[in-house]
Amino acid sequence: MSKLVNYKKRSITLPPGCKDLADLLQPARPSKLHTLSAGCAHPGIRRQESGSVRLSGIGQDLRVLFQSHPYGAILTLRTSENRFAVNFTRMGPEMFAFAVVDENTSEERLLREFFTARGLELPSTKWTPATFVPGLPVQITFGVSPLPSDASAASELLKELFRDVCAFREDSEVAFHYYEMTNAT
């Protein structure tokens, strides 16, 4: 008998929250949880929140990101049908933002017009991979550069972006997901 395993501590009882063996064997299903904090199941994630916010209220989410923990944070804002998304990433003092759309859609055309009108950098025209899965949409990433340096200016740019590209109004719902990382070292 192994000295590392104490067979007397084994039991046929299920852990708390499991009503049968199927519950134990299935991976945890994501719930409609809006806030996960300190006990988050993902290593390296200190805080996680998701839900929806009105376009008029995204400034508060951006303020949280701009004031976030110094190790890093990610805020993703997207349409409910996932046709358009904007990601803000903070790693230490550095802040990055990019918009993602499917290639050859009205959203891509409107996003190009938005970037051109505001003097933001457009993605390279030679970005399409040589091989990809036929029939699956190809997405284009537009890096927001130059990026506004404060939450208020970034919020106004983001609101304009959703209004111009998605025809959103101030009361339109935007899905969000926020992660705040811990020190990985």
Image: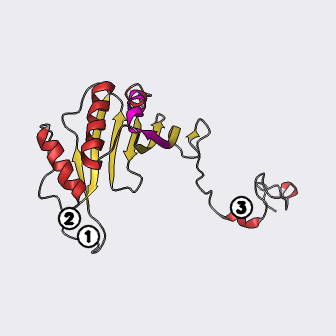
When the figure is inspected, residue 171 is found, relative to residue 20, above or below; the finding is above
Kind of residue at badge 2: Pro
When the figure is inspected, residue 31 is found, relative to residue 38, above or below; the finding is below
User: Residue 118: which disc?
Assistant: none
Please identify the residue farthest to the bottom as the structure is shown. 134
Q: Is residue 54 magenta?
A: yes
Sort mark 2 into few (<14), some (14-19) or many (20+) by Cα contacts within 10 Å. few
Which element type, helix, strand or loop, lies under badge 2? loop
Q: Please tell me in which quadrant of the rendered image residue 28 appears.
A: bottom right
Q: Residue at x 68, y 64 (%)?
A: 25
When the figure is inspected, residue 109 is found, relative to residue 74, above or below; the finding is below
x then y, percent, for residue 56: 38, 33
Task: Specify the quadrant that holds the N terminus.
Answer: bottom right
The residue that disc 3 covers is 24
Task: Depth check: give the residue in front, 67 or 32.
Answer: 32
Q: Is residue 124 left or right of residue 93?
A: left
Q: Which residues are magenta?
A: 51-63
Q: Is residue 7 magenta?
A: no
Q: First in sequence: mark 2 or mark 3? A: 3
The residue that disc 1 covers is 132
x then y, percent, for residue 106: 22, 57
Most common SS among magenta residues:
helix
- Image colouring: secondary structure
The residue that disc 2 covers is 129
